Image (cartoon, rainbow, N blue to C red):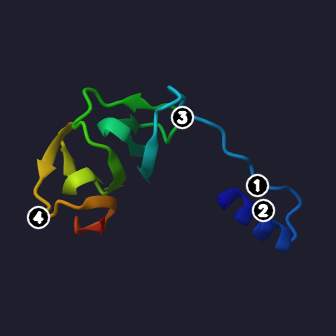
Amino acid sequence: MVVVAAALVSSAAGAAEPPAVPTALVSGTVHQALFSIAMDGKTGYAAGAAGEILQTGDGGVSWQAMTPAPTPPSLLGVTTNGGRTLAVGQKGLILSLKNGKWTSVDSASKSRLFAVDVNHKGDAVAVEGA
């Protein structure tokens, strides 16, 4: 939908060329599922099923799996800003990345966390669901 919306905006503005269509940067197994991506400059993270986290340091040109996966439950949201990186997921799971290692943070929730965001001061907020 983003590409369609961008095409409509470009068309309304009288742009001569349609926006570029995104290409797949990462491919995997048929059942591989990534649910969230976050970029801060050229550093980025993608999170998904079975605790999978991919990392890029070149603006998304290449991605590497962070192994081993830090947790078996699915990770549904990830954010990175100013050196602070968090991932959230099933059963209130919150992970924080420090010195290249993911550690669990107490969320005081057992509900699924769908998304997370962190500002430049390190304040974070997560979206909880049933």
Residue 129 location (% of width, % of height): 31, 66
For the residue pair 91 and 18, the one nearer the viewer reads as: 91
Q: Residues within 10 Å of mark 2 (few under 14, many from 20)?
A: some
Counting residues from the start of the chain, the first of labels 2 and 1 encountered is: 2
Please, what is the three-letter code of the amino acid marked with disc 3?
Val
Label 3 belongs to which residue? 61
Q: Find the distance from the CA under tag 2 to the CA under tag 3.
A: 24 Å
Give the distance between the C-alpha atoms of the residues marked 1 and 4, in whole angstroms.
43 Å
Measure how far apart labels 1 and 3 are at the Cα level.
19 Å
Q: Are marks 4 and 2 in contact (CB under 8 Å)?
A: no
- Closer to the chain start, of discs 1 and 3, is 1
Cα distance, mark 2 to mark 1? 6 Å
Task: Identify the mark nearer the N-term, 2 or 3.
Answer: 2
| Residue that label 2 marks | 7
| Secondary structure of residue under mark 1 | loop
Q: Residues within 10 Å of mark 3 (few under 14, many from 20)?
A: few
